[in-house]
Amino acid sequence: MNSGKNASRWLVLTLVVFLAVAVSSAALSAELSGDEIYTVPQGEVVDDDLYVGANEIYINGIVKGDLIAGAQYIEIGPTGVIEGDLWAVSNSVVIAGTVLDDLRVAGGGVEISGLIGDDAFLTGAGGPFEFSFDTGFPSIEQGLRISGEIGGDLFAFAGGAEISGTIGGDLFGGIGALDFAGVIGGNAEIQASEFNIDDAARIGGELKYTATEPLELPAGIARDITFEAQEPDEAPGGSIVGAFIRWVLRTAAIVIGVGILGWLLFRFRPNTLLRPAAAIRAKPLETGVYGLIAAVLLIFIPIASTILVTFTAAFWGVLPAVAMFVFLVAASALVWFFSPLLTGYWLGEAIGRRLGGDRAPLFLLLLGAVLIVI
């Protein structure tokens, strides 16, 4: 029994190390942390890649590699330097320092007043997608606010955004409400429901924008301008209601599907959900770090799967390669279905503890699933 457990641990450790190296060739001994408040003070240097899961993260020193961070609040101070990539998932992200390589952020609110050396991929809330709740942690206004400098391209998708900084490359944006007063070295391709351009804005290349109606643009704002009108609603005043009804039906279908799968698991294999949920509850920060790392590593799964199938075909033939392909697809589908079930049950269980009283596990699963779907 012990030898089996040891073998499993070595297998998991080997896979984690292999995939961590795949994320960055420099990540030979990445540093992990799961403190509630994590800080790299000014003058301190982290020589490796850094993976952090915490409630609050403050970087005022230097990280020589990549920083992969998940928290309620993340701040790269004015003296903070990330020499590699920054991957961040947070309710609020503030970058006043320097990221020398790429920036990838998914957050409710994102503020950039510092320097991004290469490309930036940003998602945020704000605008028509504004939502607010008191987390008890520091927070900033939702949406994207960019007043600093981005050396490469900017890919921005948010409910609301204010861009007054400098973008060295191109801008690609899908934004609900955009206020633009910045400078773009390349082209700009923008889709926005509300689009305001300041007289000080400048675009070195071509501006393509999609809006409800043509804008009165300042003279000389771009080398060339192309306007594309948004498709009109199918029925005036009725499209919003129709979209809402479709959303309700889609949400109900997902919740019903989750309910059926959840009932089957609780009926025949209850520990499949109960044990992982208990593990998350016991060590939320540690599992958060591993979950964030796993989410990043999923990018490489299709590449690794293709290589594996190709090698199988080369050494053992077509039929084993087909069998390997079917196995990989089935495993991916299993993860795809199981992950929201586990996350939904864990979230529902956490809410149930706050509400008090005993509630059926299936009810807690559906409660968490509804919140995740919404």
Image: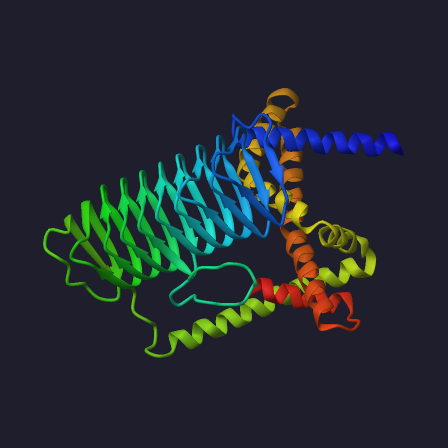
For the question of whether residue 45 can be seen, the reply is: yes
Q: Nearer the viewer, residue 107 or 303?
A: 107
Q: Is residue 352 above or below residue 89?
A: below
Q: Is residue 360 above or below residue 188?
A: below
Residue at the far top in the pictured view:
315
- Please provide percent x and percent y for residue 21: 57, 28
Number of numbered discs on residues? 0
Q: Quadrant of residue 5?
A: top right
At 62% from the left edge and 36% from the top edge, which residue is drawn?
Answer: 325
Residue at the far bottom in the pictured view:
237
- Please provide percent x and percent y for residue 366: 68, 67
Q: Say whether residue 142 is left or right of residue 275.
A: left
- Please provide percent x and percent y for residue 182: 24, 51
Q: Quadrant of the N terminus?
A: top right
For the question of whether residue 319 can be seen, the reply is: no
Q: Quadrant of residue 264?
A: bottom right
At 72% from the left edge and 63% from the top edge, which residue is drawn?
Answer: 349
At 26% from the left edge and 62% from the top edge, which residue is drawn?
Answer: 195
Q: Is residue 229 above or below residue 245?
A: above
Residue at the far right in the pictured view:
1
Residue at the far left in the pictured view:
219
Q: Tell me how the rendering is colored.
A: rainbow
- Please provide percent x and percent y for residue 318: 62, 28
At 77% from the left edge and 65% from the top edge, which residue is drawn?
Answer: 361
Q: Quadrant of residue 270?
A: bottom right
Q: Quadrant of the C terminus?
A: bottom right
